[in-house]
Amino acid sequence: MKVGVCTRIANLLVRCFDAGPGECVACVTTYLGAMRTLLLSSLLLVGTAQAQQKTFTLTSADVGGQATLRQVFNGFGCTGENISPQLAWSNAPEGTKSFAVTMYDKDAPTGSGWWHWLAFDLPADTKELRSGAGTPGRTGLPTGTVQSRTDYGVPGYGGPCPPPGHGPHQYVVTVHALRSEKTGLDATATPAVVGYTLNSLTLARASIVFYYTH
């Protein structure tokens, strides 16, 4: 498209050189208008590209479209390893003072979904959580991080474990960029209270989605 526009402008410029005295002013005016349009379009493309590069983004080297037994819960009839996935994020918004990580299953047959992971008060310089960092009994979370009670009834990561035959469940892992260094919550906070608090403090969110069927 850019090549075609530039070609048309070049042809217009040639016609301006060949134009007679009566047509010259109109031709040059048209040429300048075309150049202005091209310049504005180029600036818009550059601005869009820069904005895309700065989008708050979450990735994982461990999970793609589907969970594996490495992430699946060990209990409730499931026999996975319950290893929390590796997570990495970038381009958090200006003003971010801490992060929170959540994992939620909206398809759980509870009427209110199922919270699988709630971690917050991660320092603002945190960029990654290694595999297993959120698994109960393991180390790897930044100093000061709090993990609160999930719907399994205990703090820490609890992997997918949908009812047998219930079909694929969608799991949303989200990193929340927060405007406060501390949420004021501790490990006894309920998922509802954590969710309410995070919503009130969140500047931006970045999520990944994966599925699992039991």
Image: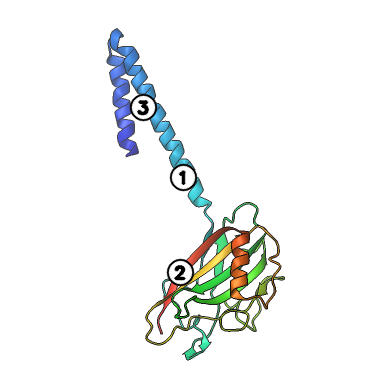
Q: Please determine whether, in this image, residue 32 is positioned above or below residue 50.
A: above
Q: Which residue is mark 3?
A: 34
Q: Nearer the viewer, residue 59 or 202?
A: 202
* Residue 4, position as x, y percentages in the image: 30, 35
The Cα atoms of the two marked residues, 3 and 1, are separated by: 21 Å
* Residue 144, position as x, y percentages in the image: 72, 70
First-in-chain label (2 vs 3):
3
Q: Please determine whether, in this image, residue 133 is positioned above or below residue 23.
A: below
First-in-chain label (3 vs 1):
3
Which residue extends farthest top? 21
Q: Amino acid at mark 1?
A: Thr
Q: Quadrant of residue 182?
A: bottom right
Q: Amino acid at mark 2?
A: Val
Q: Which residue is at 32% across, 15% downward?
A: 26
Q: Which residue is mark 1?
A: 48
Q: Nearer the viewer, residue 148 or 68?
A: 148
Q: Amino acid at mark 3?
A: Ala
Q: Which residue is mark 2?
A: 209
Q: SS of the residue at dot 3?
A: helix
Question: How many residues crowd around disc 3 within 10 Å: few (fewer than 14), some, or many (20 or more)?
Answer: some
Q: SS of the residue at dot 1?
A: helix
